[in-house]
Each structure stands twice: as structure tokens, then as C-alpha cells.
Amino acid sequence: MSFRLRVTILTAAAVAVAAIAAGALMYLMVQQQIQSAFDDTLKTTANTARLGGPRPDDRFGGRAGGGQVFLSGRPDIFAQIVDTSGSIVGSDSQVGQSPELVTSQVLAVANGKSADGWSDVTTSTVHWRIYAVPFSPGHALEVARPLNEIDAALASTRFALIGLAITAVVLAALLGALIGRAVLGPLRRLNETVNDVTRTRDLSRRVAMNGGDEIGNLAASFDGMLGALEISLRQQRQLVADASHELRTPLTSLRTNLELLARGQPTDNAERQQVLVELVGQMERLSTLVADLIDLARDEEATLPIEDVRLDEVVADAITDVRGRYPQVRFEAVLERAAVRGVRSRIARAVTNLLDNAGKWSPAGGVVEVTVNGGEVSVRDHGPGVAPEDAPRVFDRFWRASNARSLPGSGLGLSIVKDVAESHGGSVSVEHATGGGARFRLRLAGGS
């Protein structure tokens, strides 16, 4: 079943329920009002006839035009007097007696068992409403009036309300169809865009739908998702291109040096040893690049547990690890107790990369100053620092300064630091340190 059909059916059903409920309530109110007015007329007529009307032996009652006498005082209301045995002892001479109108309620009134009584009787042609009151000891006066006109009026009311309900349901169905069409227009446009993106893989497509309603918000969210996917795809393609370029350089150098060695060149032992040293360095660079790529992919794809992390302990462990790789550099730490929420392994990787970058740029005998304060890790080296024009690109993937080409590294270390910081709701920045060198600040959200 289509959404448009469901909207039409639900709208028609809702209106049908409302129309039926309103019609039934209206009918009951009309019926009650008519019945109440009808009964009040019978009660007033009976009481008037009882108090001022003829007695069983009277020959005169109410008069109508032409000198006709009516026991009830009204020509449209029939009346007769009944004794305790059910015998009719008085009635309108023009109408005659009606034994079929003597009911158990009338006898109960005649026998003094009830103060008054109501009953309905249907004869062969007429539906009567009967009211009985005490008339004299051992007698009851009953008045009766046909309900045919009231029944006809109520029947007309029922048919009118049923017709109104049917008309309302039909109109609701038409309106539901129109509403469904109006609602489905934007959704159809959104669906077409989704199908086009699926078919063409063109993430530059946009729904571009205006409006502040739920459908407009959905379209805006979808456009935002397409934009994020487009940026992600562009970054992935750039990553693949950059990784291919970075891998090609050490692989080409490795192949060249291996081909030289395979041909027995160079023949000089010193030169041959130098080629072997270069091979080892190229292998280390290649291994570092591959390891960084694997870590970067794992960090982006894996869902790792989030926990309370003692930032000062993570930094202390990272300093111990990095000291072994840079024995000529002295690491000085001022670590205040601090805790953050995050992935311990990723935070440790970011801190290690900052320390590794500082150790790499520090001169022999240099000092790297590390502090932890709240949720911030500050790493300051005394190297050449970062040129102002290079600062905006320091955290880009595979970007390396011109004076860093000869140093080991993959160009991914600081970009990994940025990814870790942003994934933890924080940031990373670089600034020129007073007295020379660079200071990197890693800020993590929720530090205490």
C-alpha cells in the first residue's frame, strides 16, 4: 500500500469516526429534546384534565371546534379512564374506547401502586406514547398521543446525519488524496535525488529544498550528509593519491639500490656499505609510512571503548618510550594530575607523535619541555620552529616542510594528532615559542 493511499484512508477514517460520533451525539440530543417536550405536553395535559376535567359521570369535557367534547381537552391527545380491573369507564365519545392502550403501568396507577406511569404501545397502524395519573379512588386517567410524527422527524434526522457523514467522508478522502499528493511531492523529489546519487555516484547533487518544516529539515539533513560524504570521498581520494606518491619515492629508491647491489655495484666496500645504510633508512621510512597509514585507517574505522583516561600517566609512559629513540635529547616534564574521557590508545598515539616530532627537530643536547594542565598537553622544543607561512599546513596529511625532506617521517604524525583531538571534542595548535622553537598544544574536552 502506497503512502499516499495510506494518508487518504487514514484521513477518511479519522473524519468518518469524528462524523459518526458527532452525528450520534447530535441525534441523541435532538431525540432527547423532542422526547422531553413531547412528554411534558402529555404530563401537562393529564394533570390539567385530572384537576379541572370531567369526572367519570360527567357528560362534558374539553371542547373543540364544532362543539366536540374531548376528555383530554385537546383533539390531538386521546384520553380514557380505567378502573382497577382494566375496564374503561370513560372515554372520548368521538374516538371510542381503546382497550389495547390499557397497559400494566396504567393498571398500577389505577390500583394505587404507582403515582404515575409511562408506556409505549404500538397498534396495527399507530405508535402511542401513554401517560397515566390517578383520577379518583380506584381509577386512573391515561392520555395517549401518536409518536408517528416524532418517529418520522427522527428518521429524517437520521438520514440527514448519515448523508452528512457520508459526504464528509468523501470530502475527507478527496482532501486526503490532495494532502498526500502535496506531501509526497517533496518526498518524491528527495527519492529521485537519492536514486540519481545511487545510480551516478555523483555526491555533488543536492535536493536544495526550502522550508522550515519536517520535510524541509529532512532535505537539509540529506544535503548535509551528501556534503559530508563528498568531502570524505574527496579526502579519501586525496589520501590515496598522496599515499601513492609517498610510497612511490621510497620504493623507487629501494628498487634502484637493490638493482645496483644485484649488479655487484658499487664495488667499493665503503660505497657499498653506504648503499646498505640507505636501504635500511628507506625501509624504515617505508615501514613508518605503512604503519601510520594502518593506524590512520584503524582510527577512522574502528569503534574503540571510551573510558576515563589519566592524561598525566599517558604522557609519562609516552615520554619513557620516546626517550629511548632520542637519547641525545632531554625531556623535562611537569605533569599535573588530569583525567579525560576518551580512547586511551588514540590519546597515547597523539601524545607520542607530538613528542616524536619535538625530538626529531631538537638539536643534540636540546631540551623538550612537556606539561600537563587540566585537559591540555603542551610540548615545546628548542628547534628551528615553524615558519609562519607553514603553520596553516602543519597538520595536513603528508605535508612536510621543505627543510624536513631529509628527516625520517611520513608526514602523517601531526595529522593523526589533529584527528585524535577533533574526535575527542578538542583541538591542537602550534605557536612560536619565546626564545625559539615551537610549542604544540593538544586540548582534550572534559579534562579535570
Image: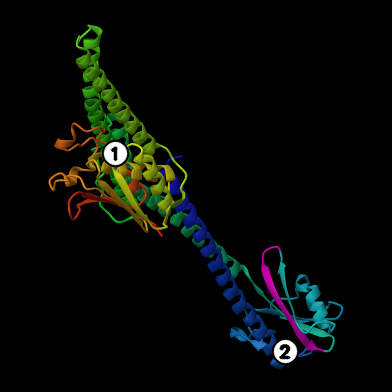
Q: Is residue 151 above or below residue 366?
A: below
**Residue under the point 85% across and 86% down:** 138
- Local SS, label 2: helix
Q: Nearer the viewer, residue 362 or 95?
A: 362
Kindly identify which residue carries mark 1. 413
The answer to whether residue 125 is magenta is yes
Q: Nearer the viewer, residue 138 or 21?
A: 21
Residue 349 lies in quadrant? top left
Percent across and percent down for residue 43 are 67, 83
> Which of the two discs, 2 and 1, sits closer to the camera?
1
In the picture, measured across the screen, residue 269 lies left or right of residue 340, that is left
Q: Are marks 2 and 1 in contact (CB under 8 Å)?
A: no
Kindly identify which residue carries mark 2. 50
Badge number at residue 376: none
In the picture, measured across the screen, residue 109 lies left or right of residue 47, that is right
Q: Which corner quadrant holds the C terminus?
A: bottom left
Percent across and percent down for residue 2 are 43, 40
- Local SS, label 1: helix
Residue 88 showing in the rendered view:
no
In the picture, measured across the screen, residue 413 lies left or right of residue 101, that is left
The answer to whether residue 138 is magenta is no
Percent across and percent down for residue 425 are 35, 52
Q: Nearer the viewer, residue 348 or 95?
A: 348
Q: Which three-letter amino acid code belongs to the residue tagged 2?
A: Arg
Real-space Cα separation, disc 2 to disc 1, in angstroms: 112 Å
Q: Which three-letter amino acid code belongs to the residue tagged 1?
A: Gly
In the picture, measured across the screen, residue 4 lies left or right of residue 109, that is left
- Range shown magenta: 124-136
Percent across and percent down for residue 193 are 29, 38
